[in-house]
Image (cartoon, rainbow, N blue to C red):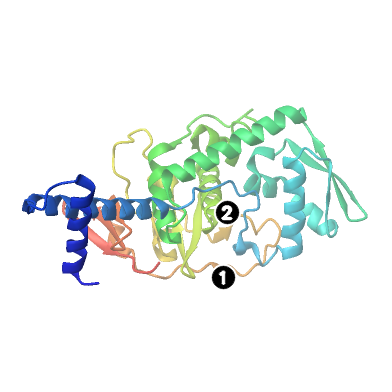
Amino acid sequence: MGKTKIISALLALTLLVSGCSSEAKPVSSVVNIKDADTSLTQAAETSAETAKEPEPFTFNPHVHCDLLSEIVTEDMWNSFYNMVDAIRAGEDTFKCTDKKAYEWATNEVTIGSFLPAACTIVVGNGFENGTGKLKYKMDKAKFLEREKAFEEEIVRIINEATRSDYSDFEKLTCLYDYFCKHWVYDYNELDGQGIDDFSDYACLMKKNGICCEIAGAFSYLLLQCGVQAMSFGTSCEHDWTYVVIGGKGYHCDATWGLHGDYPDAPCTLQYFMMTETERLSALENKDQLQATLIWPWKDNYDLARFSATDETFKSIHSGELFAGIDTERKVIRYINTSGENKELSYGDM
């Protein structure tokens, strides 16, 4: 139907409904009808936009780190997930493929990294005939409250920091900025402190920690969002987070980016998306790098698997300050050392 016929039909309908005489209606009546039609269209478009809002993040109890594939098989992961489900339900046993899987699943480092609220609270209590046994060092009801509170806090953080429909790089960028803005470095003495004071769990709940806690906590948040990440470091100096974006590795140091004491200050990008060369040059101790969650299990692992050579972000590593991210145009906005507003394209990362 042509545009003239549509307008004529609308005018006829208006006359019929209003019971007016056959006198010509003012032009303004036609405009009002058109405006009403436009408003409906805009309302429909607004509804469509609202419908496109991404689903919020929900807690993922089965976080998976592909970077551990050299030492952790899928059977081992599945045994760990069986244990996670049992712990979250307050059960005492879980199905486990073999003793090796049981020992990895119940190891304090494994639980601390992938089920933080249960670290040292729930421990292994033996393996027999495909069944792993668990022991709770806290009243089960209280532990389940603890776990629930932890899960709620994790979901709050990631939903406040980023969106589920962002790319891996966009999630990483938003979480890095959020983490650096809300966490502070913990200068308290470590002696005599328990798991609620020194652990990934403590860092996530209290928003403070030292480098090894910060590296683990930041990695855990990324894994919750589906971004591959793992604690990384040197044998005697410092820990940070190694991430994989678009199949390429990068080093991100949230510890050196922290400014929670000055939350209104912009985040420095100097330690974000670094190459291995840049990472080593920033360290006083040039000791060999190490994958924190692998070397205790396998000291001759392939370190070359964790390469970081892409220099896409080299231009923002001289003290540039984060000013925002434009996910439509795929650019990071930043302020350079001369105070100028600049942009860096990240493309399809």
Q: Say which of 263 and 51 sits in front.
A: 51
Q: Position of residue 128 (x, y in %)?
A: 92, 52
Residue 212, x across and y down, in percent? 54, 45
Q: Provide the secondary structure element on which disc 2 rests.
A: loop
Q: Which mark is residue 156?
A: none
Instruction: Residue 298: give x, y in percent of width and height.
Output: 70, 62
Question: Which residue is the site of mark 1?
Answer: 305
Residue 181 picture quarter: top left
* Residue 337 in sight: no
Q: Is residue 63 above or below residue 75?
A: above
| First-in-chain label (1 vs 2) | 2
Q: Amino acid at mark 2?
A: Ser
Quarter in which the C terminus is drawn = bottom left
Question: In the image, which disc is placed on residue 235?
Answer: 2
User: For the residues marked 1 and 2, what is the alpha-carbon distance in whole angstroms?
Assistant: 18 Å
Can residue 290 be seen from the camera position used here? yes
Nearer the observer, 23 or 321: 23
The quarter of the image holding the N terminus is: bottom left
**Relative vertical location of residue 237 with respect to residue 2 in this rendering, above or below:** above
